[in-house]
Amino acid sequence: MDFQVVVLAGGNSKNLTPLVSKELPKPLLPVANCPVLNYVLHQLEQSNLKDLIVVVEGEDAALLVGAWISGTFIDRLHVEIAAVPEDIGTAGALRAISHHLTAKDILVVSGDLVSDVPPGALAATHRRHDAAVTTMLCSIPVSGPLESGSSGGKDKAKKLGRYNIIGLDPSKQFLLHIATEIEKDARISKRILHAVGQMEMRSDLMDAHMYAFKRSVLQEVLDVKDTFQSLKEDVLPYLVRSQLKSEALLNRTPQGEENSTEKVSSQNNQAFISRILANASTPSFHGIYSENPDGSSSTRKTHKCCVYIASSSSYCVRLNSIQAFMDINRDVTGDADHLLSPNNIIGPSPKLGTKTTVGPNCRLGEGSEMGDKCQVKRSIIGRHCRIGSHVKVVNSVVMNHVTIGDGCIIQGSVICSNVQLQERVELKDCQVGAGFVVTAGSEYKAESLAKKEK
Amino acid sequence: MDARRLSRAVPRVRQVGFFTPNTPAQQPQPQSAAPSSESPPLSDSPASNSLSPVMIPPPRHLSDNLGGRTAAVPVPGRENSGELPTVGSYNPSESVLWLDSPPRSRIGDEELSEGAESSLGWYRRSDSAKFASSLPSGGFKLSTAKHPGSVAAVEAKNPLPEQSEAQKEQASSSKPLKAKTTKAERRALQESQRAAKAASRAEANKSGTPGGAPSSKPMKQPPQKKDGPPVASSIAASERIGVDRSVEKERKKDLPPPRKQFDDESRGGRAKRRSVLNQPEARNRVELFRHLPPHKNGTQLPYLGSKFFELHEKHPAVYKVGLQYLAGDLSGGNARCIAMLQAFQEAIRDYSTPPEKTLTRDLTSKIGGFVSFLIECRPLSMSMGNAIRFLKSRIARLPLTLSESEAKTTLCSDIDRFINEKIVLADKVILRHAATKIRDGDVLLTYGSSCVVEMILLYAHELGKQFRVVVVDSHPMLEGQKLLRRLVVKGLSCTYTQLNAISYVMHKVTRVFLGASSIFSNGTVYSTVGTASVAMVAHAFRVPVLVCCEAYKFHERVQLDSICFNELGDPDAISKVPGRVDVNYLDNLTDKQKENLELLNLKYDATPSDYISVIVTDYGMIPPTSVPVIVREYRKEYLLI
């Protein structure tokens, strides 16, 4: 279908410290005992997209990710791993691999997207409108733990920052305005507003970071605007802003194409045909705008920025914060368990002590052992964990090779690999970085514990 | 190969079979066994292979069919006298076939590939299309009247491709059981069957409940099946052809016409399995129109979209056009045709012949796949059918010596030429012709948005003629507003009104210009729904009606009404008024209440030729009666391009 897929897997995310580290880059962060990148790749594989470019920040991370992909998806996907320097942003990463891009359209997917929206739907919308860029919008996920309302207030404050202000045309097909954060003022192009006549501002939608770009447009923008760092914050708003006064650079390539496809038939006929086609198709505001007052199509250049709005029933969350990590873990084991790909096999049932109860929506990795009278509710426990007696784990994520001493109480926390919790530790809403040792009897609340950097 | 060739020669050989009695038991399947040269049964027409939904009848059947229908020869004499027209009609058909499908002679000993088969099926199938169109109109009336047999006889005369597998099975199972009877006995049996049939049909017609049509089918068929074997068994093998025919006649009346009939459950099921899109349920659809493919509305769009990357074999350009059809982004006969041809052009450019296949045949089947995909998105217009037929014939006629790249460039330039000559140039010629009919002070009325009419108006305006335009429009498409906008922008003085006010504006009008989706050989104009009423009102007011239509949209089919062939639009589009929240009377009906509601949104209607004064085409201005001439001449011409 002449689409190339770029997965922006990222590297070490600051938002997710202490969960991610050099040894565990963000793409490999386990969500329900399965690296987050797996969800994206699985989704793409399901859509029959097997030639992928995975862009990873940092050489070391790229090696780790590459090893994992080649181990997991061997013979199933044809993946190229590209390592780019850290902190060059999403646009920078695309710029770095720009020379690899050859297809007519590029599908850019963020590696931390956990979603069941088929990428084909986005691509189809993109093609149908012949758009310069199409972005997927999804409704903002319900955040925060459902039952334990303990951290609710704080989450709401956090959620505010994630609002996107999105302007749509009445038919909800075109993107007219996008601002990522709440700013004091929003500038809306008068030209666009005039052309469309009516704009719908939405704050309940979120940019899912899945884009389809026309390659020529993307490369032009990346080349010319070399200060652009981020797709979401620079490139997309730029394209949206300039859709009605699309600068020459965006239309250079189409013109070239026109000339090349022009056959012996006279220009006149070509114009005739294009007029028939234009008259027959439903005009978008772009077409109406580019029309001169006398009706002839003018030299005003436009390009279309389309949106694909995922239906509210589909699941679509980005793993870009610790809260999101908790939410995704909860949802993947709970409501959205269809996302779990088949290769996420639950190992041989772990050894449970007497009177130990494991509630619903839990996932226990292979080889984990639990002592007597433990309680596990709505939690995920990784592989080869050793959990002592009288331990309570609620709403938490425990990664691999964790040792938990007797009498610990863990609520709403994330415990990374190789952590050792000694006896009677109480953790609430904490994140414990990899390899950390929590001393016996300590109590923490809403803290982030990690090994000191040497 | 041998088998194939023999079975293709069926029609000619059949007479032999008729004249030689006591032929041995019959080969049941046409394709499988080598048929004995004496008597392939009637049902063994080779055309019963793959059914492509696009059907364009070749002209030979036109005369055949028309003659047959008007003749209405009494049944008894039919068996004998019927042979003569058959002979006459088949010889040309053979020649047409040979002319049209050169790959056949080149195939040598290989198996016929799908490509050749489908190109053949193409021509053959066309007669089935003819029947589809003639059956519901002519068939109903006649068969319920006193000559039930005449129509059936006409049907039986042609090797109908519609024999489904089921029927073939039936035929094959019944054949060995045949025994001798006299002619009189047979006739008596036939009559009784016919009476039973008529009764069952009348019964089915009476049951006017919404579920009537689907239920009537199963009702009809069981008795038929029960009858079949005994009838056959009582019949002499020596005269089995005549018998076959009578049995077949009966069957044919029961079987749905070969065009996909969507109220037939077995066929619908098969189509469902094959199709890319989900077929929406036939819920709340007007019974008379249940045979039409249901509208695939925008809800199919996300579904098709989600399969975007899974449909490998569809070329992106074709896919895009299909999406645009489905979403309604692209409408209008010319535009759809051009878009489709351009997509095919792109697909051909990117095409490379797979190893061990020949370009001619593989490309034909590929194009066939594209076409069926497009049909799923929206039924083809006649003009597109003609264009596809042109393209396929071009592919079939490619010389073998051509290299792949040469063949591709030839095809691409052929497509270009088709677009330029048949659409662009044709439109320009039509402009000239039509503009001579516009005089100063005229008031021109047009309906909907036809691109030719628009160009005529603009052209006449450029010539400096002084006239006024009345644009008549109708819900739910409101295409007229698009036209209106473009006309007003160019400085024409316009009046805009809705279709229901047509009789009030008509008395001021001096000319009516209409566009057409297709014109049939009986002069019937097939066009956007509402056109017929405009033409009728104009006729009543003695206002000349000029229909502007490119000749490539002419079609050999004969159609009398707009029921048997039409397209259904989105039923919800008529129940909701966009932008009017106050008009919401149908909104909050309960599901139970909705069961009483049937919505009908037809897209086309047929205007009888009586209402049309002149047809402006690229061959000049002609009366509607001259359409068959153009069709005949034109078809010859474009096959020889």
Image: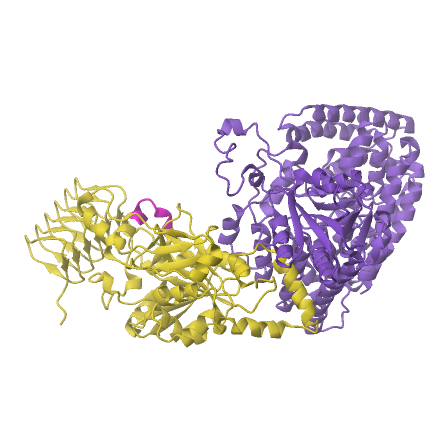
**Residue A254 can be seen, yes or no:** yes
Span highlighted in magenta in the image: A331-343
Residue A30 shown in magenta: no
Q: Colour of chain B?
A: purple
Q: Quadrant of the C terminus of chain B?
A: bottom right
Number of residue marks: 0
Relative to A249, residue A18 above or below: above
Q: Quadrant of the N terminus of chain B?
A: bottom right
From the viewer's side, name the closer residue of B167 and A113: A113
Indicate the position of residue A286 as horizontal and vertical percent values: 52, 60
Indicate the position of residue A137 as horizontal and vertical percent values: 40, 54
Is B338 situated left or right of A161 in this image? right
Q: Colour of chain A?
A: yellow
Indicate the position of residue B170 as horizontal and vertical percent values: 73, 36
Q: Quadrant of residue A11?
A: bottom left
Residue at 83% over, 53% down: B631
From the viewer's side, name the closer residue of B315 and B359: B315
Q: Quadrant of residue B203?
A: top right
Relative to A279, residue B351 above or below: below
Relative to A352, residue B424 above or below: below
Is A428 situated left or right of A51 in this image? left
From the viewer's side, name the closer residue of B80 and A369: B80
**Residue B369 can be seen, yes or no:** no
Q: Quadrant of residue B237?
A: top right
From the viewer's side, name the closer residue of A300 and A54: A300
Indicate the position of residue A220 as horizontal and vertical percent values: 45, 73
Relative to B219, residue B12 above or below: below
Is B400 situated left or right of A84 in this image? right
| Colour scheme shown | by chain
